[in-house]
Image (cartoon, rainbow, N blue to C red):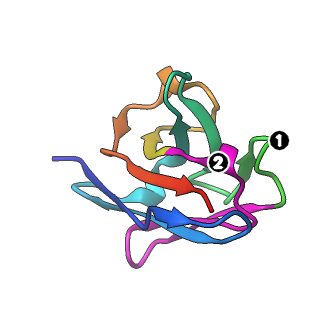
Amino acid sequence: QVHFVESGGGLVQPGGSLRLSCAASGFFLDTYAIGWFRQAPGKEREGVACISSSDGFTYYADSVAGRFTISRDNGRNTVYLQMNSLKPEDAAVYYCAAKSDLCSPAVYSYDYWGQGTQVTVSS
């Protein structure tokens, strides 16, 4: 059974950093493209970053490029999202998700989802 556990969320001041983790069980993460998404209250879920299964290609939304880094540790079957220089507008519930083939920012194209972890950016 496919299962994700996200962790690492919390409260951070503007300019601070957090590292989110997405640990998988029931399948091997390195056989899927893994995306991080976020959803703020009253807003649609949006793609933040993605890492492909085959060549390590990474994708970032314009709003986080240069501040966030996605990476994977195949030995731990875990994908990370390092978030630096956090802004209040980064506050949201963050989800990891898996899909076959290539990365995509399209929410509907992902097959498996975690339960989410809350990120709050406030002074």
In the figure, is residue 12 to the left or right of 59?
left
Q: Earlier in the sequence, mark 2 or mark 1?
A: 1
Label 1: which secondary element: loop
Task: Estimate how packed mark 1 is, as few (under 14), some (14 to 19) or many (20 or more) residues with alpha carbons within 10 Å.
Answer: few
Q: For the residue labelled by badge 2, is the local secondary structure a helix, a strand or a loop? A: helix
Q: Which mark is residue 42?
A: none
Q: Residue at x 84, y 60 (%)?
A: 66
Q: Magenta includes 46?
A: no
Which residue is at the far left? 1
Q: Quadrant of the C terminus?
A: bottom right
Q: What kind of residue is marked 2?
A: Asp
Residue of label 2: 90
Q: Is residue 48 visible?
A: yes
Disc 2 vs disc 1: which is toward the camera?
Answer: 2
- Looking at the image, can residue 80 be seen? no
| Magenta region | 67-92
Q: Residues within 10 Å of mark 2 (few under 14, many from 20)?
A: some
The outermost residue toward the bottom is 75
Q: Which quarter of the figure has residue 5?
A: bottom left
- Side (left or right) of 123 relative to 78: right
Q: Amino acid at mark 1?
A: Asp
Task: Compare residues 25 and 117 and report the one nearer the observer.
Answer: 117
- Residue at image position (53%, 28%) is 45
For residue 62, the mark is 1
Examine the rendered structure and indicate whether residue 112 appears above or below residue 94. above
Q: Is residue 115 left or right of residue 38?
A: left
Residue sitting at 38 percent across and 31 percent down?
A: 111
Up-down: is 31 above or below 18?
Answer: above
Coordinates of residue 72 in the picture (x, y in percent): 54, 68
How many dots with numbers?
2
Residue 1 image position (x, y, % from top left):
15, 47
